[in-house]
Image: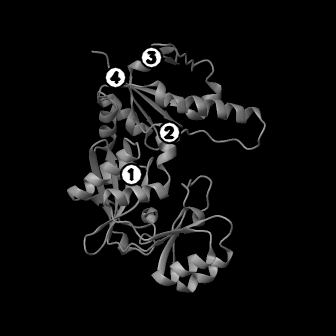
């Protein structure tokens, strides 16, 4: 029986690429790698052709038919959009972006984690909140507004709120003050005087004893907890966890919340999702957001969860 093939689409800087390639080898799969940082220079080694029955990709002089690819893994296009409007670089970006997005439908038999179209549509936090509430998750009271009066009213009613980005953040091009969530109290109401032309994303503070990073892969769920309330910085944004001496630990998520996590991931069209959940002192679970390309390497290292192996198993399963 021929070995199953998995196509990895990512830049060389991808932190978890090595873990996945190793897991693919251990599972007996063939790992094909497309380096998105090198796309403009791949005119000789990357030679796609589309036919009625199947297209193929040539990587390192080997031909791989799309029907033979069982799974595709990517965290996004991984191509930097060039500056300027009319340039050769912009044309190269547009052509490669269009082609890679089309791969989602071209490799019809492959399991994607996650396909490009789903990555683009599922990142919307407003849709995530609406879907998660309809599935049964508790969500924080939320206001999205560009009106200073409404923002001050919301802050006055809650006493303390969280302000964070509505759009996805990227550490490579955003300062910490724009990337991380921040807490505000009534004394900060004056800051809304310069609210600006864009909307702000405000939420009531979700009191948390433990914050969870919950990884969904197909129908499997891995939850890792962090004692966020023990540190001032992580009580607002757990991405500051690396500045503490604490680490993540295995956490047994209750079956109902686990089923909701799977349902939300599927409803967003995803095979893989990383949910941020919080648990308060009464044990109630609240949904904050879902990262459709969230990192997991540090979770796997801290807990021993077989996340990389599970991703490979999902990408090599037979599609119904």
Question: Which labelled disc corresponds to residue 274?
Answer: 1
Q: Between disc 1 and disc 2, whose residue precedes?
A: 2
Label 3 vs label 2, nearer the camera: 2
Q: Are marks 1 and 2 in contact (CB under 8 Å)?
A: no
Residue at 63% x, 83% y: name it. Answer: 190
Q: Please tell me whether residue 217 is drawn above or below residue 201 in the rendered image.
A: above
Q: Quadrant of the C terminus?
A: top left
Q: Quadrant of the N terminus?
A: top left
Residue tagged 3: 65
Q: From mark 4 to mark 3, how far is it between C-alphas?
A: 12 Å
* Residue farthest along the front direction in this orientation: 134
Dot 4: element: loop
Residue 237 x %, y %: 45, 67
Dot 3: element: strand
Question: Which labelled disc corresponds to residue 117?
Answer: 2
Residue tagged 4: 4
């Amino acid at each position: 029986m021929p070995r199953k093939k998995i196509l990895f689409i990512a830049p060389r800087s991808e932190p978890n690429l090595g873990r996945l390639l190793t897991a693919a080898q251990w599972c007996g799969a063939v790992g094909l790698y497309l380096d998105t940082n090198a796309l403009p220079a791949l005119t000789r080694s990357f030679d796609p052709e589309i036919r009625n029955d199947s297209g193929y990709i040539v990587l390192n002089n080997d031909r791989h038919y799309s029907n033979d690819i069982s799974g595709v893994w990517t965290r996004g296009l991984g191509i930097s959009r060039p500056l300027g409007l009319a340039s050769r670089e912009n044309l190269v970006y547009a052509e490669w972006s269009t082609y890679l997005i089309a791969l989602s439908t071209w490799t019809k038999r492959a399991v994607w984690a996650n396909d490009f179209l789903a990555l683009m549509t599922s990142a919307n936090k407003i849709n995530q909140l609406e879907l998660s509430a309809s599935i049964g998750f508790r969500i924080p009271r939320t206001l999205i507004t560009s009106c200073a009066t409404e923002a001050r009213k919301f802050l006055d009613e809650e006493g303390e709120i969280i302000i964070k980005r509505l759009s996805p953040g990227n550490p490579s091009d955003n300062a910490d003050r724009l990337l991380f969530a921040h807490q505000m109290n009534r004394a900060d109401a004056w800051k809304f005087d310069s609210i600006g032309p864009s909307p702000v994303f405000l939420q009531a503070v979700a009191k948390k004893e433990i914050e969870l990073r919950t990884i969904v892969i197909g129908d499997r769920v891995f939850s890792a907890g962090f004692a966020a309330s023990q540190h001032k910085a992580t009580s607002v944004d757990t991405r500051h966890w690396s500045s503490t001496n604490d680490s993540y630990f295995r956490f047994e998520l209750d079956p109902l919340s686990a089923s909701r996590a799977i349902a939300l991931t599927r409803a967003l069209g995803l095979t893989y999702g990383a949910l941020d959940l919080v648990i308060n002192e009464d044990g109630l679970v609240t949904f904050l957001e879902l990262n459709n390309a969230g990192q997991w390497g540090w979770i796997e290292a801290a807990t021993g969860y077989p996340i990389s192996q599970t991703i490979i198993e999902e990408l090599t399963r037979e599609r119904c």
